[in-house]
Image (cartoon, grey):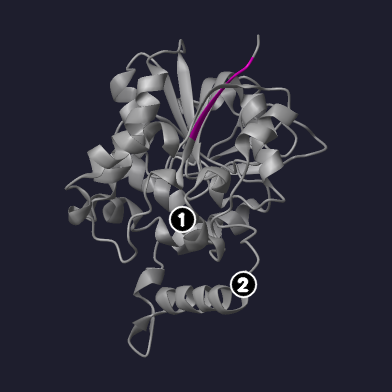
Amino acid sequence: MNTSGLAQEKILVCPACRSRLVSGPEHLSCTNADCGQNYNIIDGIPVMLPGDSDKIKCEILSSKGETNMFERKFCGIPIFKIDFVIKKMLYQLFRLKMPKLNDQRGYWLNRGNVYCKEFIDKGYENLEIFFQNLVIDELRKLEFSSIFEAGCGFGWNIKRFKKEFPAARVGGLDFSHTQLLNGKESYLRDSRFELTEGDATRMPFEDGAYDVGFSLGVFMNINPKRIGSAIDEMIRVCKKYIIHLEYDENHASTELRERRAFKTNIVSHDYKKMYEEKGLKAKLFMTAKDFGESYDQFIKDRSSGVKRWETWEGPSKYILIILEKQT
């Protein structure tokens, strides 16, 4: 495979040491002799995850044939629902919270096989598009020539970015190969997108690789011990603006805080405070108090078409923050 055709190759660096890379027949290699890390290219996607490249390749190949975890049952009851009920009862009875997940890559390698279809077929996009519209409205006020999404999944947001801003260079980073593959072969089907497999806490991009970096409901899945690294990486990789639509329990309804308190995959982070500690101030900060009324009007008569075993979570599931870097 000739890797020179990768649109994003010039901005890729070794995530382990940030050295430049050299192309091989089917891989990229770090030019730092003390590092020597190799990175596979699978399905035309550079797999920029530090570690044993053979092991990572086996994980990816085996994940493609895995049974959907949501179909696994015990005595006829889906296992994920049993797990949910147990955690909920422990919290309600004893206020006991299980530890937050340290890494969710394995989960998304499996779920990535079906998430694109699930998102569309179950009508999630009909509700989530409200928040996507919020971001598009704000992006129209900014000057930029490139944008990427950290945790792009199958590409729902970046496809919209390219539609609204066709002249911009658009990239997507995700640690789930199955998600990216669904985007590349099914949802996006457009070679203009720079799709890269990598971890948001160790991004494989050079400094200032993109003007704008964005995340939607992704950083809320990063363990508190690792979130600082993800914030540092956004600051390093983004040249002009950083935008997050994420969960911050300080601005969530009491009902939503209780519903999410016992979940091991969702973490609340105070983004405004974390960036201020890094010397960045918010150019814009919005909560449900700002867009809740518009959301309620938008949601009217839409939620009935969503097939979800839990009820929808409402406007306080996200805050919107935009940070501008001083150049």
SS type, badge 2: loop
Res 214 visible? yes
Quarter holding residue 73: bottom left
Q: Residue at x 49, y 47 (%)?
A: 252
Residue 242's place in the image compared with 201, above or below, is: above
Residue 39's place in the image compared with 235, above or below, is: below
Asked whether 144 or 281 is in front, the reply is 281
Q: Which residue is mark 1?
A: 256
Q: Residue furthest right?
A: 34
Q: Which residue is mark 2?
A: 95
**Image quadrant occupied by the C terminus:** top right
Q: Residue at x 60, y 44 (%)?
A: 199
Callout 2 amino acid: Arg
Callout 1 amino acid: Leu
Q: Position of residue 318 (x, y in %)?
A: 46, 42
Q: Is residue 35 left or right of residue 223?
A: right
Asked whether 189 or 323 is in front, the reply is 323
The span picked out in magenta is 320-325
Q: Position of residue 302 (x, y in %)?
A: 19, 47
